Amino acid sequence: MKQDIEKFTTLLRELQKIDLEFPLQYAICLFEIALNEGLCLTDLSEKTGMPLSTISRITSALAKKKARGKNYGLVQVKISPKERRKKQLFLTKKGRDTTNNISNIMSQR
């Protein structure tokens, strides 16, 4: 059990590298996007159970700036080539590196 808690603490510290106060909801969205790149905001809302307005705010913060102006740059929002009103979500290089680091932490024994 101690090993599991240490691993979890290491994972949380990795998230703190993004921001010392990185919200859990942001992490959930980031990893749903990593698992399902190209999904739209509505799909992310359904997968997380969060309201669409919350998803919109979170993805904006993950892509651009949060309230205090720090740039996360973890997600890229693209307009769907098939449906111009639909926004698709993809990881940036920084987002992919972050999720890979956390995945590596999880796979350590």
Image (cartoon, grey):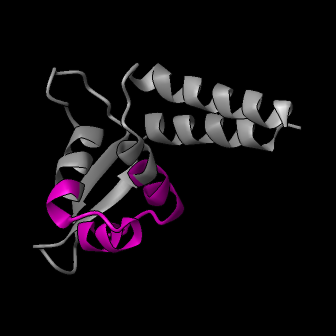
Residue 38 located left or right of residue 100: left
Q: Position of residue 79 (x, y in %)?
A: 19, 64
Q: Quadrant of the N terminus?
A: top right
* Tally of numbered tags: 0
Q: Is residue 106 above or below residue 39?
A: above
**In the displayed structure image, the side of residue 80 where residue 23 appears, left or right:** right
Q: Residue at x 47, y 23 (%)?
A: 16
In the image, residue 97 lies at what x, y percent?
A: 55, 35
Name the main secondary structure of what is drawn in magenta.
helix
- Residue that appears at 63% across and 37% down: 102
- Note whether 44 is above or below 77 in the view shown: below
Is residue 50 part of the magenta span, yes or no? yes
View extreme (front): residue:
1
Occupied quadrant, residue 53: bottom left
Front-most of residues 34 and 19: 19
Q: Is residue 60 magenta?
A: no
Q: Residue at x 12, y 73 (%)?
A: 84
Residue lying farthest to the bottom in this orientation: 82
Residue drawn at (40%, 71%), measured in percent from left and top? 47
Q: Is residue 54 above or below residue 82?
A: above
Outermost residue, right direction? Answer: 109
Q: Is residue 69 left or right of residue 9?
A: left
Q: Which span of residues is magenta-colored?
A: 29-54
Q: Position of residue 43 (x, y in %)?
A: 32, 74
Q: Quadrant of the C terminus?
A: top right
Q: Is residue 20 left or right of residue 13?
A: left
Q: Which quadrant of the structure image shows residue 56? A: bottom left
